Image: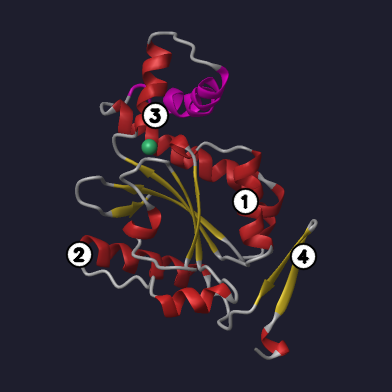
Amino acid sequence: MGSKLQTCYSLGNMTVLDTSIPHPPTPEAALQLLLDGNRRYVNNAPHLDESPQRRAEVARGQHPYAMVLGCVDSRVPPELIFDSGLGELLVVRTAGHVLDHAVLGSLEFGIEALKIPLLVVLGHDRCGAVKSTLDALEKHMHAHEDIDWLVEHIKPAFEVAQHEQNLLDATVKAHVRITVNELKQTPILREAVEQRKLQIVGAMYNLESGKVKLL
Ligand SMILES: [Zn+2]
């Protein structure tokens, strides 16, 4: 591998050696790649690359084209629903895609070190984490503090959506929008968005159709 293909990025104390060749696509091109992948998934025509050859290729360096912040739900694995193989997506998942410092640090790593131009916040219908939050709020229940952390961070979305007919899905959508706005307020992500190096979009996944729709 010629040295001209190698770039060192520094992020705090972390240094990443990126030996991959392609330049990052624009945010718009990355979004198109992602939606094209979802279309293949819906049409049951996958061509994600997890071959030994691809494994050897990405072992030398990674160049993912998009980040997905999604829910831990076992039915919503981003690599599958976007038909993306090894080295293509940086994925962060928490219950109800709730933010914390580890999540933000991971996304900032994707932006600063890997120059990823797209971040999708992905909610889904019938989200168990959001449902648990609604139940806890309705019954004024308290769980132990880690679960309460999730409830507290999903609660603002309930307050936005509480008069909607389908309360659960409306709360998920509100939570996606609130999360996108929160991310846009953090210094590193805000700067990247202002410099048009990053686009942050919200989206919803439908469990039955497999389709992802942008919000
Ligand atoms: Zn969920």
Q: Disc 2 or 4, which lies upstream in sequence?
A: 4
Residue 2 in sight here: yes
- Residue marked by disc 1: 106
Callout 1: 10 Å neighbours few (<14), some, many (20+)?
A: some
* The stretch drawn in magenta includes residue 160: yes
Q: Which residue is mark 3?
A: 130
The x, y position of residue 27, in whole percent, is 51, 67
Please report the residue visible at 56 percent of the width from the left and 72 percent of the height from the top.
63
**Which residue is at a point 55% across and 82% down the rendered structure image?**
22
Q: Position of residue 102 (x, y in %)?
A: 63, 42
**Residue at (46% x, 69% y) in the render:** 30
- Relative to residue 78, is residue 37 depicted above or below? below
Evaluate whether residue 25 shows in this view.
Answer: no
Q: Quadrant of residue 17?
A: bottom right
Compute the Cα span from label 1 to label 2. 31 Å
Name above or below for residue 141 compared with residue 50: above
Q: CA distance from mark 2 to mark 4?
A: 40 Å
Distance in Å between CA atoms under marks 3 and 4:
37 Å
Which of these two is toward me, 168 or 64? 64
Mark 4: which secondary structure? strand
Amino acid type assigned to the residue bearing label 2 in the image: Asn
How far apart in space, not on screen, are marks 1 and 3 (Cα)? 23 Å
Name the mark on residue 44: 2
Mark sitting earlier along the chain (3/4): 4
Magenta-highlighted residues: 145-163
How far apart marks 4 and 1 lie (CA) works out to 14 Å
Q: Earlier in the sequence, mark 3 or mark 2?
A: 2
Mark 1 lies on a secondary structure that is: helix
